[in-house]
Image: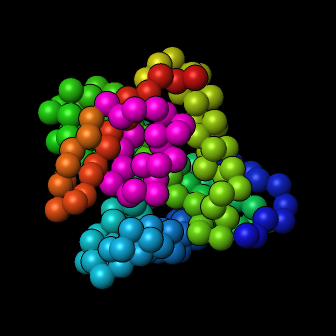
Amino acid sequence: MTKVGPLNIYPLTEDDISPVSDLYKLAITDAFESEGLGHLQGDIQQEIESKIRMAAASLNPPNSDIFFWVARIDGRVVGTISYAPCGEDIRVCTGNRLDAVGELGSLYVLPEYQGQGIGSALIAMLMVFLREQGITQFCLDSGYRRAQTRWLRKFGQPYAVVKDYWGPDSVHMVWLSTVS
């Protein structure tokens, strides 16, 4: 566990793209490995590249409906979160029933900083943003068992559960939650 200075959360800037890319390489690889999926190198790389593209797209506000924030401790990017239109997995898993609901996504924290409330602080900041925008609901999804355990505690029972979504014995969950 590493935590030294105060946590600062602010909108993503151009200067954050490189450290955010590094964060995704570490955190996404760790997430796959902890799920026993470290051998899926192509999927890991695809997920990393997708998140980096999404972060970069958020930097063009007039042409983007993606909002992105980073968390820093002592100047180091240690976490991210985004809010965007719901993604493809949510559309598929809900039969397009949540298409009009925005998605909390890209919530990643460096492995050595996990379990210290950084993810919760990012979610709390996002709730303030959503309230300020007049948004009352959001959705989120996960195929990672470790994340699903956390989301079950934080957001309750999922809106949709799709078995074998990523292959045999995999479960993908989608939550619909009220901004609170």
Instruction: State the residue in front, 49 or 65.
Output: 49
Residue 78 lies, in percent from the top left, at: 64, 63
Say above or below: 160 vs 30: above
Horizontally, is 75 left or right of 93 in the view? right
* Residue 45 visible in this rendered orientation of the protein: no
Q: Which residue in the rendered view is the most extreme toward the right? A: 5
| Number of numbered tags placed on the structure image | 0
Q: Quadrant of the C terminus?
A: top right
Q: Quadrant of the N terminus?
A: bottom right
Residue 7 lies, in percent from the top left, at: 76, 53
Instruction: State the residue in front, 60 or 180.
Output: 180
Horizontally, is 112 left or right of 88 in the view? right
Range shown magenta: 138-159
- Identify the image quadrant of residue 34: bottom left
What residue do we see at 20% from left, 49% from top? 163
Instruction: State the residue in front, 68 or 171.
Output: 171
What residue do we see at 58% from left, 40% from top? 123
* Residue 147 visible in this rendered orientation of the protein: yes
Residue 105 lies, in percent from the top left, at: 43, 47
Q: Is residue 30 magenta?
A: no
What residue do we see at 82% from left, 55% from top? 6
Q: Which residue in the rendered view is the most extreme toward the front? A: 169
Horizontally, is 39 left or right of 51 in the view? left
- Identify the image quadrant of residue 37: bottom left
Say above or below: 25 vs 82: below
Q: Is residue 144 magenta?
A: yes
Residue 36 lies, in percent from the top left, at: 36, 74
Say above or below: 152 vs 106: above
Horizontally, is 122 left or right of 22 in the view? right
- Identify the image quadrant of residue 55: bottom left
What residue do we see at 30% from left, 82% from top? 39
